[in-house]
Image (tube, grey):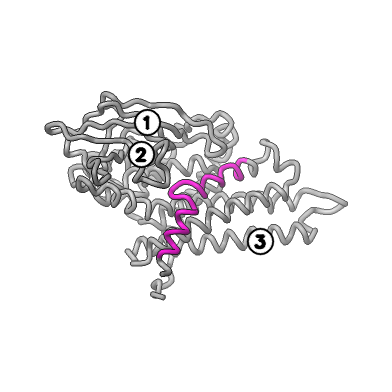
Amino acid sequence: MEAVGDVYTIPQEHLDLCATIGQIAREKIAPRSAEIDEKAEYPWDVRRLLAEQDILGLPFGVEYGGTGTGTLMLNMAVEEIAKVDASCALILMVQELGTLPIQLFGSDQLKERFLPGCASGERSPAFALSEPEAGSDPAGMKTTAVLDGEEWVINGTKNWISNLGVADFYITFAVTDRETRRLTAFVVEADRPGFSVGKLEHKLGIRASPTGQPIFEDVRVPQENVIGQVGKGLSVALGTLERTRLGAAAQAVGIAQGATDYAVAYAAEREQFGQPINEFQGIQFKLADMEISTAAARELLYKACAMADQGHPQRAKYSSMAKVFCSDTAMAVTIEAVQVLGGYGYVKEYPVERMMRDAKITQIYEGTNEIQRVVIARTLK
């Protein structure tokens, strides 16, 4: 087994920034979380807050107006926001997901056109890969792009796309060679004729993040909007998801820690049989296991993030392992948090039922946990 490198260290300035982001989340976002979830409306005020505090600049290099602080710092920030609101954490996650294809594979012209506006928070991206009949299997994609003179003409419908109706542009994958089923990645601006916003989904969790179907009807984009090489779109998608699934892992760790912290505080105050319920060993063991699992998940997440920053050869494997372990942990921990609160855990007046609903998606998006296990298993042969 190949060594996975030195133990990571977190610079003090990252810890300080993380503490600041956590304070902003607790003071400014947490009071809005229940309402944001109930109304299922995109929180523009939170987005403006994250932009004003330069938090939306975390996924970008300094040359484009970003912080240049790397993957680990970005996902520490995602975790801090997700402790109080997973939907709001997704605002930051999509900042990376919808721009990383350009950062990794785009031309200098594309980078200059799109990255500075996203780093400042003025523009918002989206990542349009999945389709109604092509989720885990991109080869089943039906969206097509045909070259007509100097422009590509895109037709098709995507599905499960975050930031629908909010995004200013969509990283769109389409079949450009029908015989070989090769894909190409494009930037499609939302104001191009033929682009429209289809149905929005009514979801179990992360309800304040709009998800649904962007529709492309003879949408024409210039050749300079191609990301990377024609026919190499699958490499763009996989190269992006290798990094961005760490965001889902960080979101999961944040949800798990938020649920643990709330359950611990509740158990210290809730009395039964004349004493706080945290005096009962049955509750103590639940809380201990929740804290252990969350701490273990965080260590794997941070290790994987550090490996991504270092370009370590095993970074993809560790990214998949972190995504699986962190999301499974979030689901297990939030279920236990609801149990600790008992009947109160089951009602909307308390946040743990929302955390449990939000946790579920972390096992599904950014590549299902089943797909991640296949990826991991292949590295073991």
Is residue 273 among the parts visible in the rendering? yes
Q: Are marks 2 and 3 in contact (CB under 8 Å)?
A: no
Mark 3, secondary structure of its residue: helix
108 to 291, vertically: above or below? above
Is the residue marked by circle 2 packed among few (<14), some (14-19), or many (20+) residues within 10 Å? many
Where does residue 42 sit, x and y in percent of width and height?
A: 47, 31
Q: Which residue is more in the foreground, 339 or 65?
A: 339
Q: Is residue 373 magenta?
A: yes
Check disc 2 and give the amino acid type.
Answer: Ala
Magenta span: helix, strand or loop, mainly? helix
Mark in front: 2 vs 3: 2
State the residue position of label 3. Answer: 289
Where does residue 170 sit, x and y in percent of width and height?
A: 32, 36
Q: Quadrant of the C terminus?
A: bottom left
The disc, 2 or 1, on the residue closer to the chain's N-terminal end is 2
Q: Which mark is residue 43?
A: none
State the residue position of label 1. Answer: 214
Mark 1, secondary structure of its residue: strand
Q: Which residue is more in the foreground, 82 or 45?
A: 82
Q: Quadrant of residue 111?
A: top left
Where does residue 217 sit, x and y in percent of width and height?
A: 29, 26
Q: What range of the chain is rendered magenta?
A: 354-378
Instruction: Indicate left or right for 154 with 38 as reference.
Output: left
Q: How far, Cα to Cα, is label 2 from label 1? A: 8 Å
Check disc 1 and give the amino acid type.
Answer: Pro
Check disc 3 and give the amino acid type.
Answer: Asp
Is the residue marked by circle 1 packed among few (<14), some (14-19), or many (20+) residues within 10 Å? many
Instruction: Indicate left or right for 91 with 238 as reference.
Output: right
Mark 2, secondary structure of its residue: strand
